[in-house]
Amino acid sequence: MQPSAAAGPPPASVWPTVAAVAIAIWSVGVTVFAQAGGWLTDQVLQASGLPTPAVVWPLIAFGNALLVGVPTMLLALVPRSPAVRATGRAWLVAAFALGGFGLLRAVPTVHHELYLATLTVLAAGGAAGLRALRRRAEPSEAEPGPAEPGPAEPGQLQSAQAEPAHAQSGKADRMVAVLLAVAAGLVMLLPWWWVGALGGAVETALAVAAAAAIGWYAAELLPRRFWTAIGAGPQGRSAVRTILLGGTVAGVGLLLLAAGIGQPGGHLAAILVLPPIGYAAAAIGWAADRSSAPVGVLAGLSAAGPLALLDPEEVSLLLAIGRDVPFWAAVGAGVGLALALALGVGLGFGLGWRRAGRPPRLAGRPLRWVAVATVAVLAVAGAAVHLAVGQPGLHGERLFVVLREQADLSDVPRGTGPQARDERVRTVFQRLVDTAEASQADLRDDLDGWGLSYTPYYLVNAIEVDAGPALRPWLTRRDDVDRVLISQQLRPLPATVEPERGDQPAPRTPPWNITMLGAERVWTELGVEGAGIVVGASDSGVDGDHPALADGFRGGGDSWFDPWNGTGTPTDNNGHGTHTLGSAVGDTSIGVAPGASWVGCVNLDRNLGNPARYLDCLQFMLAPFPTGGDPFADGRPERAPHVLTNSWGCPELEGCDLGSLRPATEALAAAGLMMVAAAGNTGPFCSSVDDPPAPYTDVLTVGAVDADREVTDFSSRGPAPDGTVKPDLVAPGADVLSAMPGGGYAALDGTSMATPQVAGVVALLWSAQPELIGDLDGTARILRQTAAEAGTGGGDTCGDPANLTGAGLVDAYAAVQAARSNA
């Protein structure tokens, strides 16, 4: 029996569609897991003090691309369905972009401008290559078209006769579609104008260029033949098929593309924002006869938000507590996601879902003027949002220029005792200033000639220049310049970060750490509380109104400096500084030396710093100056504090190299200021005492022990990079109770908590025996000789137990007794 002539073609197999769905789920899952997991790994390594090897991110990108590329290649080659093959081709090209662009993350985040420039070139080159390949293939690979001609239905004949008029309006349709895409892209930028902030001028220009190149690549990723193949189907279903199916397929491709753009951290926002714009792009493109221009414009503008207005270095777990950059980045991406979905629904409903058959004409004059007006209104709205509730202006990184000549302080007399120490400070200050003034003269003249603003320093002979990477080659080639570092700047936030607060009351008796050190016995049995000694604290600030600290502030107009925010009185926007200073000099039984006075400086803003801000505070400690004064001309070396507590370190992430602050600590030591510094919280890894100033030999470096006198897991271990045994000593650093902003108290962990207690012990020593003031070697020797035994925790001793505990646990009572007996 012969088959009926009226029988249609055999039904298409459903398995290619099932395979496409499975591959989509696989591609999205693998990509999200790889990119988010890679970022978390990167952050954990940073928090542990371990650098992320440059090869890690390229390997992640290559592995991600390979796992996605193999199945998508099969999808592009095997099925017969034009729609499925077009889907496979789009995802395969996106996987190539993920692998290629992801290689650029080998560029350190500190060199963001170089990354953006390279991304621009690679994305534009990739887009141009895709266009050339497509044009070469088009003559032999025709776009999917209508089936072989047969008996025409009346409606079909009418559509065919109308085709010439529709074709004539195609160009105008595409122009209006581009305007609609620009409007949609401006909507996508609105949350970033609110929560974000621009970097420097060069960085911003490169980010815009990179976004434009990404947009071009997206247009070539999803060309007209892709939309034609996706939209092929029975008359009347084209809009639904193109917008729903095409938007979903485009979203997967855009997710793969987004996974390759942006530095680690910033790319997570792009992964969230770019995929859902596929629906809006599909709706606009379908209405413009399946044009690829809208998806390019919309993708480029959507990518511009994270690229230009989000600093990837600040999308960090270090800032994840409170409403800092990670919070606002999540807000921006979340709002962007909601806007993208709303645009997809609105444009799909307005342009396609209420219509059947051929796309609506966009070329009519009213719609054209509406599109132009909408773009203008949204552009003004974006500017208004940025100026009114955003963070306007440019906030780029600066250059920290270290000069070749550094002051020679080797012959400064090293007298001890109050008067001799004061004379040492004056001598060191004057020599440092004279050296800086003489050696910086030519460079300052040239910078003045360029019209560039700058800040000179003397403690390290250096200049911070308000300029970007374009000036770096010129500075580096100068004979008077040793090296040029990046001085990281924090971009402002939409709202002030609230400081951490304490929820515990003041202790009625001295906490365990005070008792372990024997400080209480020094107060009660030896009658020494630190009177006459001034402790200088460089940290996130100090709550000067806290009852445990208010009475100890030295005052006098030159006892507080805030180079970050310019506050005129002691303030703490974080809580860390209040806690650390409380452990050094706080009363209500929390401070080791409650009778000592204090001065303060803000070198950390939102828990981050840079070489210049660290140096601002160290200079202030050497020669305090009145608020608004000139450190060179108005410095008062006779007002220098005696002991400096420093619970911070300057890693490469913030712009420092190993030698950045070495001249500063050498000068402070020559002046007779005892500098006590935290070892760091990057244990239990060996050789993790590596962030300046902790590794320096002229710094008293402190590790942390717990209540059982065992070194904590987090306490950084030695040896230092030069082989020096570090830390020098250990002190209680786990569950240490101290002051917090607002008048409360809290228990915190860290070598940050141990360090101020050692500074407090030095204050007790020098108060009990003033002849030791300025005698850094003699003081350190007493502390080492009287230290109690501390346990290594049973772990790796890093070649020598001293690389975990130094000389042992500081004993304030034994040290003060020894100082008095040796007098």
Image (spheres, rainbow, N blue to C red):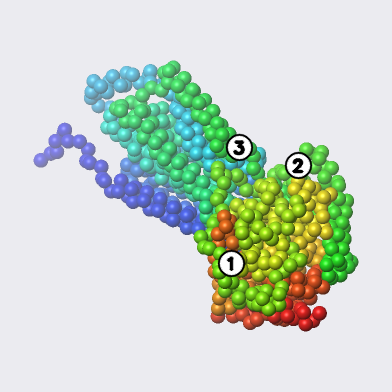
> Which residue type carries mark 2?
Ser
Image coordinates of residue 715 in percent, x first then y, are: 60, 70
Secondary structure category for the residue under label 1: loop
> Which residue type carries mark 3?
Pro
Q: Residue 647 versus residue 17: which sits nearer the camera? A: 647
Label 3 sits on residue = 392
Q: Are marks 2 and 1 in contact (CB under 8 Å)?
A: no
The answer to whether residue 145 is above or below residue 88 is above
Quadrant placement of the N terminus = top left
Label 1 sits on residue = 750
Q: Estimate the spatial distance between the alpha carbons at disc 3 and disc 1, rounded to whole Å.
A: 37 Å
Q: Estimate the spatial distance between the alpha carbons at disc 2 and disc 1, rounded to whole Å.
A: 38 Å
Total marks shown come to 3
For discs 2 and 1, the disc positioned in front in the rendered view: 1
* Residue lying at the far left of the rendered structure: 1
Identify the residue shown where x is 26% and y is 46%: 14
Secondary structure category for the residue under label 2: loop
Q: Quadrant of residue 683?
A: bottom right
For discs 3 and 1, the disc positioned in front in the rendered view: 1
The answer to whether residue 707 is above or below residue 118 is below
Among numbered discs 2 and 3, the one appearing first in the sequence:
3
Image coordinates of residue 595 in percent, x first then y, are: 70, 66
Among numbered discs 2 and 1, the one appearing first in the sequence:
2
> Which residue type carries mark 1?
Gly
Q: Residue 609 versus residue 388: which sits nearer the camera? A: 388
Q: Quadrant of residue 608?
A: bottom right
Q: Estimate the spatial distance between the alpha carbons at disc 2 and disc 3, rounded to whole Å.
A: 20 Å
Label 2 sits on residue = 453
Q: Residue 61 versus residue 377: which sits nearer the camera? A: 377
